Image (tube, helix red, strand yellow):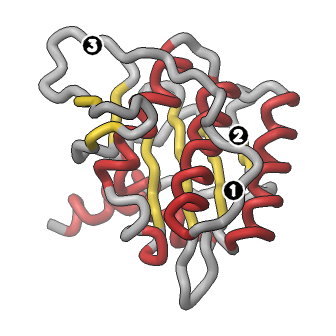
Amino acid sequence: MALLLASKVLATVEFPSPRGAVNDFAGAIPEEYEARMESLARDFWQRAKVALVVAVFPELGGEPIEEFTNRLYETWGIGGRGEDRGLLIVLALRERRLRVETGYGLEGILPDGKVGAIMDRYMIPYLKRGDYGKGLYMGMLAFAHAVAEAEGIRWKEGPVGVRAIPVRRKAFPLSLIHISEPTRPLYISYAVFCLK
């Protein structure tokens, strides 16, 4: 039992300090998109008091992405104490895994189903092609738009006019079902994706 606990402790990754809203520790995001995301996060914090944070890692060090992301969210203190209005997007390149962690202050606005739909429509298609900057930026923008819409915040940016890549998957047990408005999918619940 002690050996199992010791190996678990050794397997956890020490996190670097955050650099800002965009933390690319793998060198995967082009400067253009990094600047756009930093600007978006700064502007959205001023408007909505919601922290949007992206972190890209070369690997997870053997830790499950759910635990890794949750620990990172807590370690960095995203969203602030009390209100906990933060959103963390983590991309692990070696494992080809993506996870979004929301603070308690956003769970009513961004339940797992909505998070999954945004990832599926605005992020996954770009990430699968290796277009990490665009995929992460599109996700960040879509999450900001969803929060702004739910809270009645006028938002100059958003996925309006930005075309999502249609999603067609073989042998995937869940799919998005769209109702009459193409920008309003019926949400299903999933929040972790494997990009293989």
Mark 3 secondary-structure assignment: loop
Q: Which mark is residue 1?
A: none
Closest to the observer: 63 or 49?
49
Marks 1 and 3 sit apart, C-alpha to C-alpha, by 35 Å
In the image, taking residue 193 as reference, residue 173 lies left or right, namely left
Residue 19 found in image quarter? bottom right
- Percent x, y of residue 103: 47, 70
Residue 114 drawn at (x, y percent): 36, 49
Q: Is residue 143 above or below residue 109?
A: above
Q: Is residue 36 visible?
A: yes
Amino acid type of the residue that numbered disc 2 sits on in the rendered structure: Phe
Residue closest to the eye, 124 or 24: 124
**Mark 2 falls on what kind of element?**
loop
Please tell me in which quadrant of the rendered image residue 166 appears.
top left
**Residue 169 numbered tag:** 3
Q: Give the tally of numbered discs.
A: 3
Q: Residues within 10 Å of mark 2 (few under 14, many from 20)?
A: some
**Closer to the camera in the image, 84 or 6:** 84
Q: Is residue 39 above or below residue 94?
A: below
Number of residues whose C-alpha sits closer than 10 Å to that of mark 1, classed few (under 14), some (14–19) or many (20 or more): few
Q: CA distance from mark 2 to mark 1?
A: 9 Å
Q: Nearer the viewer, mark 2 or mark 3?
A: 3
| Quadrant into which the C terminus falls | top left
- Gap in angstroms between the C-alphas marked 2 and 3: 30 Å
- Front one among 48 and 53: 48
Q: Which mark is in front, 1 or 3?
A: 3
For image coordinates 53% across by 65% down, the residue present is 73
